[in-house]
Amino acid sequence: MKKVLIASLILAPHIAYAADTSIVGNVQTRCLITTDTNGVFGNPLPSKLSTASADGGVVPVVRYDVTLADAYLAKVTTPTAFSASPSLSDSVTWTGSTAVSKTSDAAMSGYEAAKVTYGSTTQFDLTKAGSTWFSSTATAVYGVSKSFPGGSYTAIVLAECIAK
Amino acid sequence: MRLFIVALAASLMASQAHSEYLYGITGNMAGTGHTWGMNIGPSGSQSLKINGVYYQYTPVKNTEDDMVVHVRNKRFGTNEYIFSSTDDWSGLAGGIPITKGFIIDNLPIELWGDGSIDVEGSGSVIDANVVYSYKYKNDCLTPMSDPSCSGYIDAVLAMMGESKIEVYDPLADENIADVIDEKAELDEDVQQEDEEKAEAKDRLQRMLSGVNDSILYANVTSQNLLMFAMSRSNNLNPYYDKTLSGGTYKETVVLDGGQLADNKKGARAGLAQQILHTKMVSMQYEPTE
């Protein structure tokens, strides 16, 4: 024990002259999200806004480019509120869904079957490297068959890439 | 798919925008039979090279079935493939479109044989779309682009033969001719005015000078007349003042004998002249030989 103390005393002067050394590192993104197609609301009924093409809308599409397999989860959340709209005095009921619309690899065809949905969020396990396109539908219904006030309506689809 | 292809093609173009090549993409080459020829690019283009292949299709199959899809092009004149991409769908779900893009190292079109989508196993392919991007030189799309192009001389000669050279003659231009005529008329009017002014001035000067001359001449004449009258008075007056001495001039010659005798010599000379005159007058009535 003494020997240890002595050793400590001997080392003590050296500790007094120590310097901080930084460590720098860059992490390149291996998951890139790109908006492929901007969505548009159709207005098939006075009380309904919908991105479905049958309703006169355009389905928004986002593309995930992953260069590292089995490292990320894709989470796509359909809107539950307008980010911009005229003043609304009644409630809006939202429904939405997200699906794989296109892949760059046959092995990604299982993404759709393996997806997990909770609330308005759909989660995909990106087990393969490559590009995957996800399309989301969103429908908003105002009150009980109540007409939406005239104006511009905007809603957001949130696309996230979560590291496993 | 189309946007994706265009974006990729645009990126390829941007990297070589300064080169002498032009770039393009084909339409969907995959027909209903899923086979196609490689007649692509502008006709007559030289050095056409494939620099990208993009395809998309939707597999239709049962998940448990084995299925392999080949998208490929044969190497021209052989049974080998110059491009081949295989998707193994065995044990995988169908129904979701697949999209793939490949950058090709500028392989000349002469090497590319027919293309096809071949399916092995159980299942099929729908909504197939195969697109090629390419680049080419624009040098000889028209033979006159460069003297080295075949048909250059013929094209030049044909153009010279067909072309009608129109030379612009400003004097034949109606507008210019009208302007010139108007200016000429204006100049003529101005010149005429000047001449009339000059003539009037000259006439006035002459008239004024005539008046001056007349006045001067009248003065001279009147002075001359005055001088003549004055001198005449001086010259004639002395004659009026002369008087004859005695008042009359008396006859002083007296005829001797009181008779004046005939002049015989004179009578002979007068008769001879009369005879000669008569003879001469008669001569003009004598017949000539």
Image (cartoon, coloured by chain):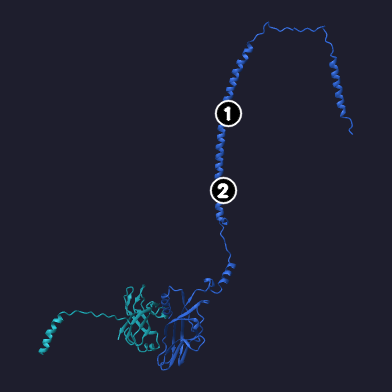
Chain colours: A cyan, B blue
Q: Which disc number belongs to residue B227?
A: none
* Amino acid type of the residue tagged 1 in the rendering: Ser
The quadrant holding residue B167 is bottom right
Gap between marks 2 and 1 measured at Cα: 42 Å
Co-location on one chain, circles 2 and 1: yes
* Amino acid type of the residue tagged 2 in the rendering: Glu
At x 55%, y 42%, the residue is: B193
The quadrant holding residue A144 is bottom left
A15 horizontally vs B114: left or right: left
A133 horizontally vs A14: left or right: right
Residue named by callout 1? B214
Q: Tell me the SS state at disc 1.
A: helix
Residue B98: image x %, image y %? 42, 85
At x 78%, y 7%, the residue is: B254
Q: Nearer the viewer, mark 2 or mark 1?
A: 1
Image quadrant for the N terminus of chain B? bottom left
A55 horizontally vs A87: left or right: right
Q: Which disc number belongs to residue B185?
A: 2
Residue A164: image x %, image y %? 30, 86
Up/down of A102 relative to B288, above or below: below
Chain letter of disc 2? B
At x 58%, y 20%, the residue is: B227
Q: Is residue A77 visible?
A: no
Image quadrant for the C terminus of chain B? top right
Residue A91: image x %, image y %? 32, 78
Badge 2, how many Cα within 10 Å: few under 14, some, many 20+? few
